[in-house]
Structures are given as structure tokens and as C-alpha cells.
């Protein structure tokens, strides 16, 4: 487990699947993730069953936040397509419990993931893609240390129009860890 002050990251369990299905079918959550088709429990179970074919370092981690009632699962994040020769990876994140948005939990989870990527896995570069229509996510990533490095013009079709996809990254040499997380 990767433990922070308000947030911790843990392995996901089969019993988490119903919440993932609920969250990923929420249009407001799905909007930022390019998910336009309904997601069934069967599809999610198949995805879960196939995780053992993926490198362990790319397994999704559940994001848990500390509440007065104990630790609560609110979303997940994962590293993707780790390239060990170039020591880079892409990262993806969602918080499905919308009442936990805008409270810095996404930021904290991302800081924990960057700490893990740089100090446990020895990666040098972590990047992500985010739609220009998702200012909450962009702001959260900027706070975590990501810098803007590019824009894929009209790379996403969303709500009947093309929008740009922003590329953001953080390098080990420039990243400042945060004691508060
Ligand atoms: C994107 C996501 C992970 C961010 O996590 P979060 O915990 O909600 O975000 P944080 O609290 O860390 O940061 C959000 C920041 O954006 C700000 N913000 C919110 N709405 C905003 C807007 N419309 N414009 C500009 N800034 C905005 C918040 O005020 C906050 O900044 P502050 O801490 O300086 O006040 C989460 O909202 C989420 O999962 N959304 C749905 C799925 C998704 O879009 N995933 C990302 C795909 S790239």
C-alpha cells in the first residue's frame, strides 16, 4: 500500500467492481475519460480477470480517502505503457465519488503516484493526456507538478465537436515532492 496523510493507494479487489461500474457510467465522470459507451458489470469483470496479463506495475490502484468513518474508496489511478528503456510512463486517474471532487484528493493521489513512479520504480518521466474541456483536471495536475508540453489539436470528438487534447508531463529532475501529502 502507498500511504499518504489523507489518501492511500491500494490494490483493487473484485468486490470494488460494482462501484467502478457505477462511477464509469456516470456521464460527468465518463466525460473526462472518453468513455461514450455504457459499461456493463460483465465487461468490467472481464477487464479485472485479465489484469494478471498486465505488468504488476501497471495494475490500477484504488484511491482511498480518510473519512471520520474510516478509509473510503473514491476512485482509481494507474500507470500505463511503462517503457523501461526510456523510463517513462503515462498516468490516468479518476475520482468517481463526485462529492470528493475539488478537495485536493486528486492532487494528493497524483503526488503519491509520482512519488511511487520516481522513487520506487525509478522512472524519469510521467506524462498524461487531458481534454482542454476539463479545467478541474488540468488545474489539479498543474498543482501536482505537471507542466504543459503540447496540444493535440482536435484529437477528441466530444458532444458533437472536436476539442484539443493537452499533453502534460513531469520529469524526475524538476519534480518537488510535497511533505503535506
Ligand atoms: C480530474 C480529477 C481526478 C481531479 O481531482 P479533484 O480531487 O477533483 O481535483 P483537485 O481538488 O486536486 O484540484 C482541482 C482544482 O481545480 C479547480 N477547479 C475546479 N473546477 C475548475 C474550473 N472549472 N476551472 C478551473 N479550475 C477549477 C479547483 O478549485 C481545484 O483547485 P484549488 O485546489 O486551487 O482550489 C477528478 O475531478 C475526476 O476524477 N474527474 C472525473 C474524471 C476525470 O476527468 N479524470 C481525468 C481524466 S484526464
Image (spheres, grey):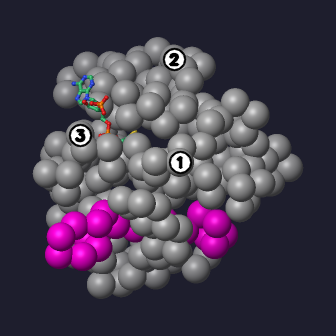
4 and 50: which is toward the camera:
4
Residue under circle 3?
102
Vertical order, 16 against 170 (above or below): below
In x, y percent, where is residue 95? 29, 53
In x, y percent, where is residue 139? 37, 28
Residue at 47 percent of width and 15 percent of height: 153
Circles 2 and 3, Cβ within 8 Å, touching? The answer is no
Query: Circle 1 sits in a helix, a strand or a loop, which is it?
Result: loop
Vertical order, 11 against 181 (above or below): below
Q: In which quarter of the image is residue 159?
A: top left
Mark 3 or mark 1: name the one nearer the start of the chain.
3
Please report the bounds of the magenta region as a residue range.
54-72
Q: How crowded is mark 3: few (under 14 residues within 10 Å), some or many (20 or more)?
A: few
Label 2, ligand 1: CB separation under 8 Å? no
The quadrant where ligand 1 appears is: top left
30 and 148: which is toward the camera:
148
Label 3, ligand 1: CB separation under 8 Å? yes
Residue at 26 percent of width and 71 percent of height: 72
Q: Quadrant of residue 28?
A: top left
With 33 as the anchor, is 126 left or right in this view? right
Amino acid at each position: 500500500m502507498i500511504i499518504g496523510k489523507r489518501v492511500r493507494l491500494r490494490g483493487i479487489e473484485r468486490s470494488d467492481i460494482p462501484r467502478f461500474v457505477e462511477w464509469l457510467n456516470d456521464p460527468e465522470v465518463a466525460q473526462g475519460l472518453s468513455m461514450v459507451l455504457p459499461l456493463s458489470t460483465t465487461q468490467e469483470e472481464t477487464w479485472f480477470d485479465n489484469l494478471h496479463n498486465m505488468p504488476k506495475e501497471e495494475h490500477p490502484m484504488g484511491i482511498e480517502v480518510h473519512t471520520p468513518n474510516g478509509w473510503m474508496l473514491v476512485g482509481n489511478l494507474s500507470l500505463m505503457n511503462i517503457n523501461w528503456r526510456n523510463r517513462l510512463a503515462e498516468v490516468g486517474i479518476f475520482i468517481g465519488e463526485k462529492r470528493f471532487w475539488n478537495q485536493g484528493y486528486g492532487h494528493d493521489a497524483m503526488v503519491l503516484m509520482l512519488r511511487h513512479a520516481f522513487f520506487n520504480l525509478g522512472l524519469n518521466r510521467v506524462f498524461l493526456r487531458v481534454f482542454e474541456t476539463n479545467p478541474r483536471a488540468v488545474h489539479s495536475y498543474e498543482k501536482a507538478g505537471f507542466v504543459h508540453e503540447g496540444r493535440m489539436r482536435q484529437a477528441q470528438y466530444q458532444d458533437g465537436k472536436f476539442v484539443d487534447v493537452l499533453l502534460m508531463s513531469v520529469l524526475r529532475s524538476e519534480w518537488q515532492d510535497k511533505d503535506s501529502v
